[in-house]
Image: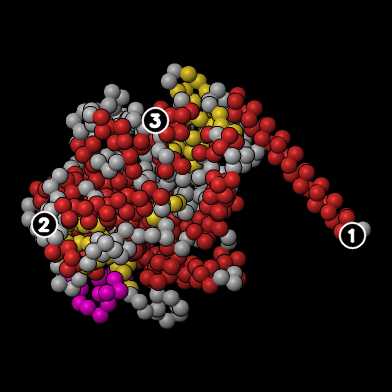
Amino acid sequence: MVATLVFSVIASFAIYQIISKYRGLQRNIALAKSSGLPVVVAPWYTFSILWLSTFKLWLPLLERFLPQSWRGMWFDLLNPEWSYMTGHGPFEKMGMDVFMVASPTRNVVFVADAEAVTQITTRRNDFPKPLEMYTSLDIYGKNLVSTEGSDWRTHRKLVAPSFGDKNNQLVFNETLHHAKSMLGLWAGSDGNGNETIADPSVAAMNFALYVISGAGFDVRVVWPHEEGKKVEDKKSEDSIFVGSEAPPGYTMSYRAALSQLLHNIMWTQVMPLKWLARSPVKMHREVSDAAHEWGKYMDEIYEMKKTQVEFGETQANMDIFDSLIRGSGITKKEGSNFTKSDLLGNAFVLMLAGHETTANTLHFSMVFLAMNWGSQKRLQDDIDNIFAGKPIDEWKYEEHFQKLFGSMPAAVMNETLRLLQPIINIPKSTPPGRPQPLNIGGKQYMVPGDAHVFLSAAIHRNPKYWPTPSDDSSKDDLDQFRPERWLADSKPDNDFVDINYDDEGLRGPAGEDTSSDLFKPVKGSYIPFSDGFRSCIGRRFAQVEILAVLAAIFSQYSVELAVDDFACDEEVEKMPKGGKERRDLYKMATDRAQDLIQTKMASIITLQLRGVSIPIRLMKRGEERFAFDV
């Protein structure tokens, strides 16, 4: 009797869910079709937490057992990474650079059209961020990323002044300091290199963390391999220096807490910190501990800097946290509109946003250049011309950054970001009950309310916007790393024109995506930092850091793919330089690297290699083993 009752309840619930999902799907299909956009019907919402966390289990089963006749365009879109894996192909199949996917729970719009991107990013009230995706970032307080409307304007005006030329100068200097430390780790104690770096992404992540720690908090992190050594330093006497020792009152060092939290931040997006603290999984508890410990460090730094501001002390190094405190007015007797949690919340998300993206760009720039010797040589030539033999200690932000930004180093950075945009689907939305018009190619379309709108990285491989060679090889050119496209003399018909903001202060001193000396993509077609009002406020911070570290590395070294898995050093030495044996050997390493970049990339927060690595070697310039003429 009881079993029958339980079965009836379960069956009734299942039937209710099926009917509810079916009705939801029919409703969403009707809304999607009313938009006038091409529509794909999908059986479920592929950006739900459940599907994102399990699709790698289900896709192989569906590919194996689902009959070919049952598959359609929806099947091609089941992998949330499709815009990276297949590029512009799905838009070509749909016959338009904007299309909708209707599912039982949500309508989604994918956008790879520059005209549509510009409208969406400039109409921030009509296409707000879906804030439900960002509430988990409020670990230490509300912030620029997790707010909208008037709250966002308030946070933007608080944060924007932090990203000026004084901070860029500090970023440049911090980058060069930590670049020398990273080179010391990679090239060995004698600096000669020729040692295999099994996973360069690890040091790249630490490098980016340490740079933003210095430029963000005026905390100089000592690299593990330099602890106990005397390292020449030009930071001010007020700067904080930290290593592997946890100070009294702490269970983790600053370096360990910061690394543990940011390298495993994905767990804070899955469940609240209080749940992580009680989890039976050790990693979950460690992340919770790291969040607690780094919160204590931020509190301590905040109180120290607040006291300095109250006593009128000037700051030699204009770090972000100092600027936030001074700009907030929180130390003034008449009070402030900001709270301590506002400052801590923004400091945290700036730290989070500034480390993975920069680290990934550095990592993949080196890998791409190792696979493209002609581009690497051209990069080195430009760096040599810019610095004219000056040692790194004599490099100056005000003298050298603009030259880097208008030449091959920037072309390498831009091309890496074109191919490997950190966030491959930049999320926007339409408010519930408020359909929004989009004018595309002279025709108006109506996006239904309560839809998710994704600005797709596939726009970076839309042939409509990018210069390609005129020969037969141009077909797959946009899938290839070719930084020389940014040095092209030709300009698009619809040249880049920056939008007029109704409040320029909201954007802050972020600067342009690319120099006027390089190819200027059509407005809205190049979005590694997003675009419009909610574009990345730290873009210039990232650009300064990436260009400075590329210059530091390639002024002294060349980067090769490691071939250890195919031949030992003794075997390589026996092969004639520039001969077929070495070329065939290096091709094996190149083919493997290309395969891993194509098949082993995945997004948790940003797009990066997962579970595999591409080993490299730094070689003193002139001592390369595989520098083939191209």
In this rendering, is residue 474 above or below 79? above
Element assignment for label 1: helix
Give the label on residue 114, or none: 3
Few, some or many C-alpha atoms within 10 Å of disc 3 (few <14, some 14-19, many ≥20)? Answer: many
Q: Position of residue 447 (x, y in %)?
A: 55, 29
**Residue extent of the magenta highlight:** 223-240
Say what amino acid the circle numbered 1 marks. Answer: Val
Identity of the residue furthest to the top in this view: 442
Indicate whether residue 595 is drawn in magenta.
Answer: no
The image quarter containing residue 305 is bottom left
- Which residue does the image show at 36% across and 43% down from the upper left? 528
In this rendering, is residue 277 above or below 625? below
The residue labelled by disc 1 is 2
Identity of the residue furthest to the right in this view: 1
Q: Position of residue 58 (x, y in %)?
A: 57, 50
Q: Please tell me which residue lies in front, 410 or 239.
A: 410
* Residue depth check, mark 1 versus mark 2: number of the one nearer the observer: 2
- Which residue does the image show at 85% across and 51% down from the upper left? 8
Give the label on residue 577, or none: 2
Element assignment for label 3: helix
Q: Please tell me which residue lies in front, 424 or 357.
A: 424
* Type of secondary structure dominating the magenta stretch: loop
In this rendering, is residue 210 above or below 451? below
* Residue depth check, mark 3 versus mark 1: number of the one nearer the observer: 1
Q: Quadrant of the N terminus?
A: bottom right
